[in-house]
Amino acid sequence: MSARVLIVDDLFPNVKLLETKLGLEYFDTLAAMNGPDAIAICEKGLCDLVLLDVMMPGMDGFEVCRRLKNNPVTAHIPVVMVTALDQPSDRLKGLDAGADDFLTKPVDDTALFTRVRSLVRLKAVTDELRQRALASRAIGMGDPLVTAAAETGLDAQILLVEDRPGAADRMAGALSQHHRVTVEADPLTAIQVAAEGEFDLALISLDLSGHDGLRLCSQLRSLDRTRGMPLIMIAEAHDRARIVRGLDFGVHDYLMRPVDRNELLARARTQVRRKRFSDVLRGAMQASMQMAVTDGLTGLHNRRYLDNHLGMLFSEEGMRHRPMAALILDIDRFKAINDTYGHEAGDDVLRAFADRVRQHTRPIDIVARYGGEEIVVVLPDAGLAEAHAIAERIRERIQAAPFAVQRATRDLPVTVSIGVAVRCADDASPGDMLRRADEGLYEAKAGGRNRVVAQAA
């Protein structure tokens, strides 16, 4: 997978060296010689990943990383800090600033390319979620990027798969200060626990007794229930080849033994933040999709949903020879309610009306607001007699009890007129069936309202 990599370093030879290495692996590169320029490039969306030197005059790499990760516009861009500093405290400072990884000079080519490819793959998924989630901002649902970037990465549910009691106790003790930790020594049990739980992160020892920890990582990546769960490998110095393989097939990060407590906490927090960032975007995307097919006042499906799904029901080969009916319901004298008691009272009636209709239809039925005070109910596998009986039941329930309006200080009697029609063999489109139901509704209104009229053909 190719990508645009931003190299940030105040020394030109270092920039050229990384440009050459990445170019040979078919990555596009950009360069910035200072922090402010790097931030500007990221804010314009011109790169997919940042290789960031720490030791720069003016604004150092830690501050650049902190600003990128605290900005909702750039928080999703992976940052790999590249430096000659090799102390655990230096790595911790970078991870605390929000860095996704930390490479030490001289940079090992295999580690560099593997990490870049892994982070670029993760960003590609995040980018797709960001674009779709931004639709929710466009329709006034708030800014999901701000919410996602504010995530702390704390109070997570973490699964630790480790069969060394001492190591498990030390890591679980450190993590338990900020998270809820489940320790499992048996890999087969761990798969079941992971699939049944709601974990934000799993840490997997690669050297489990009698079991390949990398295979366990692969299995967790392949299961639907655990595919989106971040994984961190716990590896020995001799595990370099397996680390590279794990990162290649989608493991998110790794820790080397002996595990530094602070680095453990920082890497766990980074992975949890990234997962929750994606979860927030995914939730915003789903909410915007739901709003696109839902009527905001009544909570019923809207006209767009009705048209699309009714069209599919008419066109599906398997549905063509099965019965189908439609009801069109219209509140009697609704304009008088608005004129007498105000539009707020009218909205109260519409919401309650929709609730009663929904309560007396089947789960397989399509219930949608058709416009104004009209509701359409589509009844798959229902003939004329059954549809008429359902319509009568709804009419009776609407009439049976008054509707509370004006904050439940007044009760209004409400009735409904309903037209009923069934699909005919020569119907060219759903509109033909709905037209006959509308004719039945007109007859019900003309005949005195509060009644059901069925159109057989």
Image: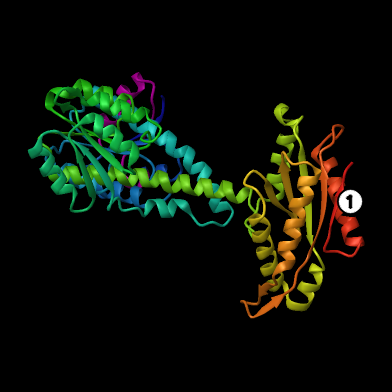
Classed neighbour count for the residue bearing mark 1: other residues with Cα under 10 Å, few (<14), some (14–19), many (≥20): some
Identify which residue, 255 or 203, lies in the foreground. 203
For badge 1, the amino acid type reads Glu
143 and 11: which is toward the camera = 143
Q: In the rendered image, which quarter is residue 337 located in?
A: bottom right
Q: Which residue is mark 1?
A: 439
Where residue 154 appears, as percent x and y from the top left, is: 27, 52
Residue 260 visible to the viewer: no
Residue 23 rendering spot, x and y as whole percentages:
36, 22
At x 26%, y 48%, the residue is 97
* Left or right of 296, for residue 81: left
Residue 235 sits in quarter: top left
Q: Which residues are magenta?
A: 11-37
Q: Compared with residue 434, is residue 203 higher up or lower down, i.e. above or below?
A: above
Q: Is residue 17 magenta?
A: yes
**220 left or right of 254?**
right
Q: Is residue 218 magenta?
A: no
**Please, which residue is most extreme toward the bottom here?**
409
